Amino acid sequence: MNNLPWQIEKIIEVANCLQHTGRSGASTGEQIAAAFVLNRQEYLPNHYSDMVEAWDRLDDWQGYVKLIKRDYLHLIDSPQ
């Protein structure tokens, strides 16, 4: 993963952490992005129960989510 933008690496790292532990110490935006990559609404931070509000919160990171889902899902670990 060394030649990926840091944002993509971070989202993948957070997604893998959520897959293994169900939680993460990541920032709000990182956690929202990972939840969308995983298609798992339950991983959204508690104060983001509305999917549209959470998606809007990502702003520029929406593109990273789309890129990961299109090209890098193989870097996401299988659920435990």
Image (cartoon, helix red, strand yellow):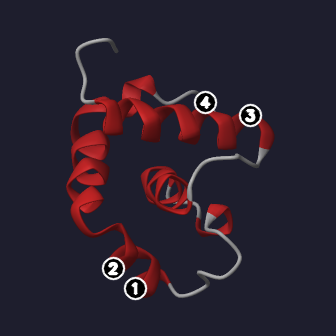
Residue under pointer 2: 56
Q: Tell me the element at label 3.
A: helix
* Of pointers 4 and 1, the one earlier in the residue sequence: 1
Residue under pointer 3: 20
Where in the figure is residue 72, as x and y percent of width and height?
31, 31
* Of pointers 3 and 1, the one earlier in the residue sequence: 3
Instruction: Looking at this view, name the residue that lies furthest to the top.
Output: 2
Q: Is residue 79 visible?
A: no
Q: Tell us which disc is closer to us: 4 or 3.
A: 3
- Which quarter of the rendered picture does the N terminus lie within? top left
Figure check: 67 above or below 45: above
Q: Based on the displayed image, in which of its 4 quarters is residue 40 positioned?
A: bottom right
Gap between marks 3 and 1 measured at Cα: 26 Å
Residue in view at x 45 percent, y 35 percent: 10
Where in the figure is residue 55, as x and y percent of width and height?
37, 74
Q: Tell me the element at label 2.
A: helix
**Of 38 and 23, which appears nearest the observer?**
23
Q: Tell me the element at label 4.
A: loop
User: The disc labelled 4 sits on which kind of residue?
Assistant: Ser
Residue under pointer 4: 78
Gap between marks 4 and 3 measured at Cα: 9 Å
Residue under pointer 1: 52
Residue in view at x 59 percent, y 33 percent: 16
The answer to whether the residues at label 4 and label 3 have Cβ atoms under 8 Å apart is: no
The answer to whether the residues at label 2 and label 1 have Cβ atoms under 8 Å apart is: yes
User: The disc labelled 1 sits on which kind of residue?
Assistant: Val
In the picture, measured across the screen, residue 14 lies left or right of residue 60, that is: right
* Of pointers 2 and 4, the one earlier in the residue sequence: 2
